[in-house]
Structures are given as C-alpha cells and as structure tokens.
Image: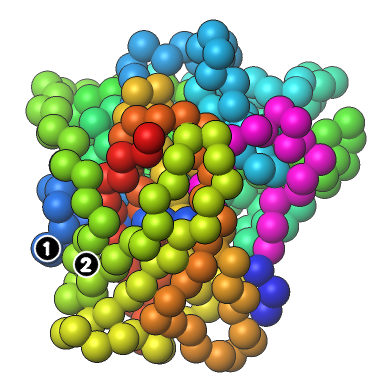
Amino acid sequence: MRTSRLPRRVLALAGAALLTTVLAACGSSGMDHDMTGMHHGNAAAASPSATDGHAMPGMDHGTPGAEGSGAPADNRAGYRLTTTAAALPAGQPSDYRFTITGPDGKPVTDFAVEQTKQMHFYAIRADLTGFQHLHPTMAADGTWTAQLAALTPGAWRTYASFTPNSGDGKGTALILSRTVNVDGKADPAPLPPASTTAQVDGYTVTLHGTPMPNMAHPVTVTITKDGKPVTDLQPYLDTYAHLTAFHEGDMAFAHLHPETEAKNGGQGGPDLAFHAEFPRAGNWRLFLQFQTAGQLHTAALTLKVG
C-alpha cells in the first residue's frame, strides 16, 4: 500500500501545521499523562476562547495539504461544519451528529477517500486529554454520526478532516472544528512536561529530531519493547503510524503522516521517518497510533517547539 497524502493545492494557505510525524495516544499505562476516557487515540491543546468560524488574528496557518489546520474554525473555503449538539452527557457513550455544507449551502455527500476513510473525526478536551480519533458513518442525506466513547466533563473541540470529491472544493483537504461542552464540573489536568519518549502498552516510543517553528525538519520515531526493536508494525490507515498534534495555546491542529510506505501485507518498524512542519513555537501535544497483532496502540507526549 502506498501512503496516502493530502492534496498540495492549498499549500499557500497551509503554510504550516502539518507535522508529518509524532504521536497519537489513547490513554494507557506508563504514559506521561492520565489519558482517562481516551478512545482510538486522544488529546487536545485547546483554548476554550477559540471562536467557531473565526480564525484568531495571525493564526490562520494550514497544514501542508490541509486548509484550516491552524486556529480552529467551523468554516473554510465556503464549507461549514454544522451540528445541533451544543452539549453532551458525561460518563457514557454518545452520538455526535454533524453535517458538512458546501458553498451552495447544501449538504455535501461526495467525499474523497483519504487514508482509507472519507472522514476522520477527532474529539479533544481543552486540557489535551481525552483524545478520540473516529471514523463516522454518513447517512444518505449527508448527516454524519460519530460514536463517541464516554467523555469527561469540560470544554471539548471536535474536528472533521475531509476532502470534497466534487464541487468547487474538489480535491481540497479541509479541517473544520466546533466546540462542545460536556456536562459536569471540569477537573483540568496539567500539561505533562516536554519529553522525547512515551510508553504505551509495554511499548516505548522515542522521538529523534529538534523541529523548529515554520521550518520543515526531518524527525524519526523509534518503537521498542523490552529494549528490543519492534519490527511487526501492521499497516494502519495505509501507513505504519497515524500522527496528530495539537497546540497548547490555540488548539491548532496538525495531521501528520509518516514518510515510510506501508507494504501490502508487510510489516514495519522499528524506525519511522516523518516530515515535521510546525506553524509556530510552543508546546504541542503529539499522538502516535500504531498497530501490532491486530491491537491499536496510542502513545502521547508533549513536544516543545522553538
């Protein structure tokens, strides 16, 4: 399988935010953070004050190939994320329904396949905990349903990552975001200190490289277990690892892809090369998802850039 890449036609707008590397973590033992409530990948650095539909001044940075990977907004290039969910219950699974409308105001129903899915959906709490990475299902009328695992109380952000397959935005990768509150008293967790290593399910993930803001920089992730190199990584979403990152200050989103191709039926590891590009300095919470023996693992770490 060949690693899928996001379209590049929006590079001018997406001058930085796609870090093609790093980690996605679903709460697990040994991690540098309590990832309670994380499912299929979790995290978020967010500012609850980020306004839906309005990028913060000077922060409309995109990711290589993804428009809107800077400060979150619910509309980009005429496309809008709409939902009736202003609040969700805490401590129990819930369905989050949303629609993507196009420049003509009508629901979009034709989406291109990116990394084996038409839609990648993320839910992240404002303190960078509770990260969930899901692949929702779409009804004939264009309504998507993401089945969220139990959420903890507090302010959350949802992100929809997709590429229209028709219309004015055909071939343009977009990331749209909205806020949602989860009922109950929030108990914010402090951001774990910066570290180049993280543990998950007995695996150790190590990041090599020193990315700088607004500069392309190669980085490598090495995965070991019990001190030995891991070489049985299975293809996951057309690659050997799926990376997502969130900025502590404004919840900027960075969707990262490894440079290493996943071979059909083959295994990978222990080293995975990435092309990292961070739009600004500061703390980024990184999440790396990888699969072995049919089990998905998510590791998280904090990376200080600049």
Residue 243 at what x, y percent from top left? Answer: 46, 55
Q: Quadrant of residue 157?
A: top left
Q: Name the colouring of the figure.
A: rainbow
Apparent side of residue 55 relative to residue 37 in the rendered image (left or right): right
Q: How many marks?
A: 2
Which residue type does callout 2 highlight? Answer: Val
Q: Is residue 5 above or below residue 185?
A: below
Q: Cβ–Cβ below 8 Å for labels 1 and 2?
A: yes
Residue 164 at what x, y percent from top left? Answer: 77, 41
Q: Quadrant of residue 284?
A: top left
Does dot 2 land on a helix, a strand or a loop?
Answer: strand
Apparent side of residue 186 relative to residue 105 in the rendered image (left or right): left
* Badge 2 density bin: few <14, some 14–19, many ≥20, Cα 10 Å: many
Q: Residue 200, which numbered label?
A: 2
Q: Is residue 5 above or below residue 240?
A: above
Q: Chief secondary structure of the magenta span?
A: loop
Q: Tell me which numbered mark, 1 or 2, is placed earlier along the sequence.
A: 1
* Badge 1 density bin: few <14, some 14–19, many ≥20, Cα 10 Å: some
In the depicted view, which residue is nearer to us: 30 or 39?
30
Judge whether residue 264 can be spotted in this image: yes
Does dot 1 land on a helix, a strand or a loop?
Answer: loop
Q: Residue 30, which numbered label?
A: 1
In the depicted view, which residue is nearer to us: 88 or 44?
44
Q: Quadrant of residue 13?
A: top right
